[in-house]
Amino acid sequence: KAGVTQTPRYLIKTRGQQVTLSCSPISGHRSVSWYQQTPGQGLQFLFEYFSETQRNKGNFPGRFSGRQFSNSRSEMNVSTLELGDSALYLCASSPTGGGSTEAFFGQGTRLTVV
Amino acid sequence: AQKITQTQPGMFVQEKEAVTLDCTYDTSDQSYGLFWYKQPSSGEMIFLIYQGSYDEQNATEGRYSLNFQKARKSANLVISASQLGDSAMYFCAMRVPSNDYKLSFGAGTTVTVRA
């Protein structure tokens, strides 16, 4: 069974640009969550999608958005990039996202904003 | 609100020895799930072990075991017979209903296994 696939693995963008990251969850998983990881803030929850609907949202500005397609693949978009957006972005999939279900993570996309 | 605390920023352990990683949590929810993840330098978060708040037995998965002390709100991870490949960052995480089951993570502990 294929794991969670995130593309691209590495990305370098300039301030003010926008970026789209992609996540393909494990087959059959309907919940996809996104996390931002930085040395200073640690792992922070961005949002969760379940069956094409945003189910949860973290405390990030509106520049961060996402969507989920009917095949459960998800994309995350960051507009008007800032230097502080440089981070490892991790995507996690789970069957339902409920209390006892572990989340399976991809290898992440390392975004550098210059 | 829920909170996960990992007080050990970094630890060194000799190969083949056991190591205990501390994790304390705070939540007013009666039902919750506790998770441990491993993050090697490659970046991927690898699920290790799960403990439910109502589970009476401590969880075990191979060389990983979870020392769950509910009254103390503690969920320490024990890695037995450490291997060089265990060198990584380890995160304790929790899901609670009052937070819509979002995974909340601690700050992590870096483990370095010495030969």
Image (tube, helix red, strand yellow):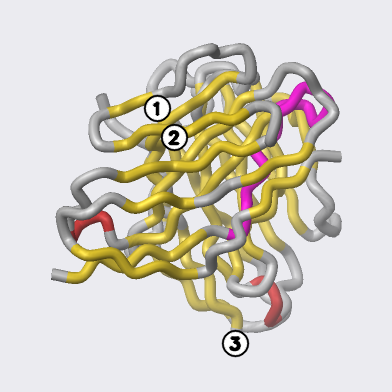
Residue plotted at (60% across, 68% down): A38
Crowd tier of the residue under label 1, counting other residues whose Cα lies within 10 Å: few below 14, some 14–19, many 20 or above = many
Quadrant for the C terminus of chain A in the image? bottom right
Residue shown at 43% from the left, 16% from the top: A28
Question: Mark 1: which secondary structure?
Answer: loop
A21 left or right of B86 in image:
right
Instruction: Name the kind of residue labelled 2 in the image.
Output: Phe
To which residue does mark 1 refer?
Answer: A26
Q: Is residue A51 visible?
A: no
Chain hosting mark 3: A
Q: Tell me which numbered mark, 3 or 2, is placed earlier along the sequence.
A: 2
Question: Which amino acid type is shown beneath numbered disc 1?
Answer: Ile
Same chain for marks 3 and 2?
A: yes
Residue to which mark 2 is pinned? A104
Circles 2 and 1 on the same subunit: yes
Left or right: B101 as drawn, with respect to A106: right
Residue to which mark 3 is pinned: A114
Which of the 4 image quadrants contains residue B96?
A: top right
Q: Chain of mark 2?
A: A
Marks 3 and 2: which is nearer the front?
A: 2
Q: Report crowding for label 3: few under 14, some 14 to 19, many 20 or more residues within 10 A (C-alpha).
A: some
Q: Is residue B110 left or right of residue A53?
A: left
Foreground: disc 2 or disc 1: 2
Q: Earlier in the sequence, mark 3 or mark 1?
A: 1
Check if residue A7 falls in the magenta segment. no
Frontmost residue, B25 versus B33: B25
Q: Which residues are magenta?
A: B96-107
2 and 1 marks in contact (CB < 8 Å): yes
- Provide residue B36's location: percent of width, then percent of height: 48, 40
Q: Where does the image place residue B10, in percent across and percent down from the top left? A: 46, 70
Q: Is residue B52 above or below residue B40?
A: above
